[in-house]
Amino acid sequence: MNKLIISPAPHIHSGDSISKNMYAVLLALVPAYLVGLYFFGIGAFVVSITAVLSCIIFEFLIQKFIFKTTTTIHDGSAMLTGLLLAFNLPSNLPIWIIIIGALVAIGIGKMSFGGLGNNPFNPALVGRVFLLISFPVQMTTWPKPIPFNTSYLDAETAATPLAMIKYNFGNLPEKMDLLIGNMGGSIGEVSAIALILGGIYLLIKRVITWHIPVSMLVTTFLFTGILHLINPSLYVSPDIHLLTGGLLLGAIFMATDYATSPMNTVAQLVYGIGIGLITVTIRLFGAYPEGVSFAILIMNGVTPLLNLYVKPKRFGAPKTKKN
Amino acid sequence: MKTFTFGGIHTADMKLSAGKKIQIVPIPSEVIIPLEQHIGAPTNPVVAVGETVKVGQLIGKAVGFISANIHSSVSGKVTKIDTVIDAWGYKRPAVYIAVEGDEWMENIDKKDVVRKEITTKREDIIQKIADAGIVGLGGACFPTHVKLSPPPNTKAELLLINAVECEPYLTCDHQLMLEKAEEIIVGIQILMTVLQVNKAIIGIENNKKDAISLLQQITSSYSTIEVCPLAMCYPQGGEKQLIEAITKKQVPSGQLPINIGIVVQNVATTYAIYEAVQKNKPLIERVITVTGKKVAKPGNFLVRIGTPLRVPLDMAGGMPEDTGKIIGGGPMMGRAFMNADVPVTKRSAGLLVMPTLESARKEMQNCIRCAKCVTACPMGLEPYLLMSQAEKSMWKEMEETYITDCIECGCCLFSCPSNRPLLDYLRMGKSTVLEQIRNRVQKVN
């Protein structure tokens, strides 16, 4: 008879795995990616493929030659970082800039801290913000959404709605266009409907919980709503804020990143509210028209503190604190 | 439908042996009865080698208050008193008995008639339960007479009967309820008399609809006993979880259910109490489930204590070709055995045979801080944090992170996508911290 295995309980497992979660998020990104391909054409394709491939290759090279360990590129996390990075880039960005972004995202954002799970900041956003600060012109020139666009670097450009609001020019797109994504912007952030679809899928699959996206969106809505009520001519209505910029992409896919968000629901609510407040502050009073990336990175930095001081509710905890 | 509110997981039900009639396992030619089958002090053997014993005769006498008598489950001759590797993997003293016939002690009522009238006086009931060596059959094996003697300054107000059986695969309690419902109700009345409570609630998970309706039908004529169906969620059979699910009350951290006036008894224990008080029958046999995906005929078996587990396993179709692991108890809290020759004890609720593919754990990966262990923890703890503290031997910090609240249910390890051995580290930390606390208390005294 073959030998029996002895191991402590429990003897069954949910079957959940890192790659299952990663591929679920990738699948949830597909609708937004298709909309991006539709409006930004060839450019979106080139940018995304470059970002994904270079992220995977950098992770492989670092693990193989610097860490000298087995590689984890098959778990889907490098692919996800690459795609999220591409989602945050304009579709007319030159390839060499994208490769730099991928190197910063994987090399500095993720691997320098020890790889998956150990990174304090969202790697895709580290890459994106690095590029935004280093190449401000290229990073803020967005192509005009033209169905099945075949031009890449020389694409006709358009301003994002938030830039129009910030610098007071142009006509805002119609509500319907904001919903389906017919506006200037980064590849994956434009279509509210596609992003929400992906978010619903992640909620059903229990990959994410509602706490971070909802607290973040509600805070943004209330904050901008109050300002709009005070002075409608200076501050646009809150629904415009919800549908524009990277807010939905950030709320559903970036802020919910496992490694960089807090570990219990109460802390997650605080975290979401913090991102919402910082986003609106940057958008309305800061130098940039958009602030989601910075807001998420700042709250990423606060996450360890939240984990330390905001504890989950304990079963049977005494009502008053022990002396 | 009611359930508990903290954490919990949803496992595949896998009740392969549900509704299978309890089969009586034939008496083997030799039984090995460990002298320690409970929490507390081991018993002293009171028989000598060569002595003839009857079914139900005392062979191990309880030492001290927290201990439980052990009785012979067969009639025959004591061949040796030696050690045996029991279900928990420890060497324990045990009595080996060669079986001769099936002669019972004269005072045991063997008739299969439900005796409803309770004639034993309240004071004598606890003594009878102690004499019969009844222990909690839900898994902990804590001596029942101790649990029924509330500490000073506490008073029981409510009796909960734990018929949840939330472990996947196991069906022994379920089948017992279907076949011995009347007896269980009498057992509940005995418990209510002892505890002097006028309310009892039976908590059953909703996957046992037939048992729920049967018990509802019987209890409809009793105003004091109620059946409470519960939505399925593991670990609802945990004492604190069951209390919260039914009464919405939380047992304060570090305290016992009796501190909020509640006593919980397992349904199989309740049946054993009925047999002890009404039939003078000590705890010499129990119902166990033998099951597994590859087991030919999964079923429920009434087996004498001390019978090698191989005997009921053979009745269920024998050990399957594809066996990677055999587990005593359920898959969430059971123990893996080295072989199927270990004797059945009061603790054995089942024998689960796992196919090779499901037996080994998967390789551990980095913690991705997904917080699924925190969400799953039914005690509101932070398993990821406790594990990293245990890895670094930070016992003081573990105590401050409330490791002593851990009920070792396994929800954290079950739900971890990185297959991290969370519970293994938590167990190690918990036992270390508890030992430190004991040492501290001793120093103060």
Image: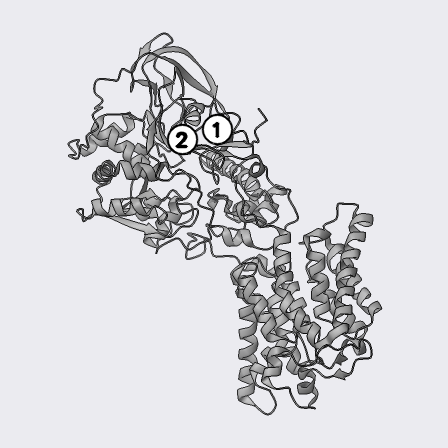
Of B60 and B260, the residue lying toward us: B60
B254 up-or-down from B436: above or below: below
- Amino acid identity at mark 1: Trp
Query: Which residue carries the number 2 mark?
Result: B347
Q: In which quarter of the image is the C terminus of chain B?
A: top left
In the rendered image, residue B69, in percent from the top left (x then y), is placed at 33, 24
- The residue shown at (37%, 24%) is B305
In the rendered image, residue A63, in percent from the top left (x then y), is placed at 78, 50
In the rendered image, residue B236, in percent from the top left (x then y), is placed at 40, 47
Please state if A285 lies on the left or on the right of B138 as rendered: right
The answer for which chain carries disc 1 is B
Query: Which residue carries the number 1 mark?
Result: B88
- Amino acid identity at mark 2: Arg
- The residue shown at (77%, 69%) is A47
Query: Can residue A256 be seen?
Result: yes
How dense is the environment of label 1, judged by Cα within 10 Å: few (below 14), some, or many (20 and up)?
some
The answer to whether tags 1 and 2 share a subunit is: yes
Query: Can residue B198 be seen?
Result: no
The answer for which chain carries disc 2 is B
How dense is the environment of label 2, judged by Cα within 10 Å: few (below 14), some, or many (20 and up)?
many
Residue at the extreme bottom: A233
